[in-house]
Amino acid sequence: CFAPKDPFCLVDPGTTAMVTSARRPRVALGVAAFIFVSQRLVDFRTFAHGAGSLSSRKFRISQNRASRYAAQPGVMEVPKMEEAPVYMTVVDVMSGELDVSSLPEEMGVYAVYNEDNNLQYIGLSRQIQKSVEAHAKAIGIQEVGSLISAVRCAEMPGQSKELLKETWEKWIKSHMDSGGEIPMGNLPENAPGADPRWRNRGPPAKPPLNLGGIGGITSPSEALDAVTKAVKEHPVLLFMKGSPAMPQCGFSARSVGLLREIGMPFESVDVLDDRNNPGVRDAVKEFGNWPTIPQLYVKGELLGGADIIREMYETGQLKTVMNDAISGKSSERSSGVQASNEGAEFTPRGQISLINDPSRPTATALCKALSENFRLVDLRVQDDSAAHEGDAGAMEMGLTSESHFSVEIVAPDFEGMMPVQRQKKVYDVLSDVMPRIHALSLVTRTPA
């Protein structure tokens, strides 16, 4: 802790900024919190019990980082909290959702007030509007209108993370110096009165489904039936390795993170759980005609794997499709009929990296299949196997090398296709190669 003699120290878990108390409180308070000493050093401390009330506490900000930013060219001064503009929010009377469209989309620091003008949370964000929207999703329709009534925002485009942290600290100090208490959203998780929803990106993770039920799964056909039934019953279903609370592979972890980021509920199935879901790992690959895990199904249709989930998240499509699935609306996604490319001529404009090396048979076969079946404009193939040496899944397949690849393809053959159709086309071309690959990160694009 930067103030080792001070027994009370509060930290916002979403940042590495720290606020320390200058007075010993008078009411018993036991708080356990994570104290981030720097971005590279994490120091866990248990806070002592004391006595006191939060009402008379004065706070001082750790002065380890001097206010040096204003002297640097192109760097703004720390904006004062009382000078930052206030934006009012509105609740849609039809949907009950919070309308945050008036809030700035820039990076900066923000303070959220409830309908009684009491400060609830001070945060920093790369996109203020999206962060407040995430808070609204985590809080829920029942309370969001009363808890997020107004937002004070200081836009700080292009500024450093350090300056944002210093601004966050000074806003906390300003609020405390004016007689305010610690905002509920900034209290450590175990502190009395803390509201951890402010630091959550979505609802708590649900436990994975048990597709076997009481009778269990005893054959491949029963496993396929169980997958079919689950996909029909659940609007949003992710087949993954591990659970949302503890993913067992990087692709599954990334997919769960993006789904939770948009704040929408979803069900999951752990394909590695041989006790509750025996045979499901192979059954879902057969069901979706998709060779990799994870697989995301929305309203009974395969949306795609980890790369498509990321692509749709970045374009905003993922949230739209998820919202439609949860609300029961029909999605207006195109069926993705391939556009005709007959007679078109394309000249390669990018980098085409074809591997032809007898010592790398899998990479060579992969490149050969792609070059023979697509009019390549750009192709990048990267062997990531060294970073996954000793991977249990690869070893289970008997792979000691050439097990993990990243592939990016740009080709006119993908014109008019949905992302899932583009990737299925690639997987069909690589059908003879995929049994030799444990993990494939695939990006497919059309020429600009």
Image (cartoon, rainbow, N blue to C red):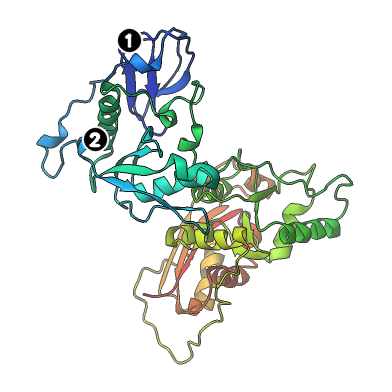
Q: Position of residue 258 (x, y in %)?
A: 51, 50
Left or right of 107, for residue 210: right
The reply, left or right, for residue 243 in relation to residue 120 is: right
> Residue drawn at (63%, 63%), measured in percent from left and top?
328
Residue 347 placement (x, y as % from top left): 36, 81
In the picture provided, is 404 more to the left or to the right than 130?
Answer: right
Mark 2 highlights which residue? 81
- The amino acid pointed to by label 2 is Met
Name the residue type under label 1: Arg
| Circle 1 residues within 10 Å: few <14, some 14–19, many ≥20 | some
Query: What residue is drawn where x is 60% and y is 56%?
Result: 437
Q: Quadrant of the C terminus?
A: bottom left
Question: Would you say 171 lies left or right of 66 here?
Answer: right
Residue identifier under label 1: 23
From the viewer's side, name the closer residue of 128 and 420.
Answer: 128
352, 73: nearer the viewer: 73
**Mark earlier in primary sequence (1, 2):** 1
Residue 50 in view in this figure: yes
Q: Quadrant of residue 166?
A: top left
Above or below residue 42? Residue 345 is below
| Residue at x 33%, y 28% (from the top left corner) | 17
Q: Residue furthest front?
A: 116
Q: Position of residue 107 (x, y in %)?
A: 30, 47
